[in-house]
Image: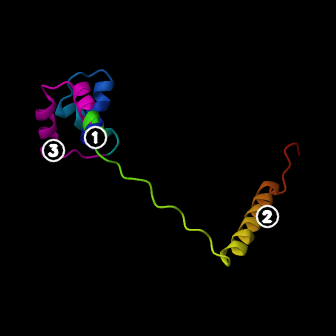
Amino acid sequence: MRHIAAYLLLQIGGNASPSAGDIKKLLATVGIEADDSRLESLISELSSKDINQLIAEGSSKLASVPSGGGGGAAAAPTGGAAPAAAEEKKEEKVEEKEESDDDMGFGLFD
């Protein structure tokens, strides 16, 4: 992923055909070492192709992939769980009030 991300960043930056050296240089600026074998295979596969066309083809393929369904309905709370939930809500409200009042002894205009 880092190699293709660097390739795309270089293309967005104006380099229409980034070389392996360009990608290595970009990755080195953020302290990432490039994997030469993966980098060479990436360059060889993308050298004669339009990246915008590849992205469009990939997007159309991903659109046909099911992305899962919604989860099941939430279980209804039982009678014993309702009071515990109410206590938690009260505690949260108290904590929020304490945090907002805490100015560590310093006023805005002191």
Instruction: Read off the residue under disc 3.
Output: 38
Q: CA distance from mark 2 to mark 3?
A: 55 Å
- From the viewer's perspective, tell me whether residue 95 is left or right of residue 53: right
Q: Is residue 49 magenta?
A: yes
**Residue 12 x, y percent position in the rendering:** 32, 25
Which numbered tag is attached to residue 94? 2
Q: Which residues are magenta?
A: 32-58
Give the x, y percent position of residue 28: 29, 41
Left or right: 81 with respect to 23?
right
Can residue 7 be seen here? The reply is: yes
- Density class for disc 1 (Cα within 10 Å; few <14, some 14-19, many ≥20) is few
Q: Main secondary structure of the magenta part?
A: helix
Asked if residue 5 is positioned above or below residue 19 in the image, the reply reads below
Name the spot of residue 67 as percent of width and height, x first.
35, 48
Type of amino acid under label 3:
Arg
Q: In the rendered view, would you say 71 is above or below 34?
A: below
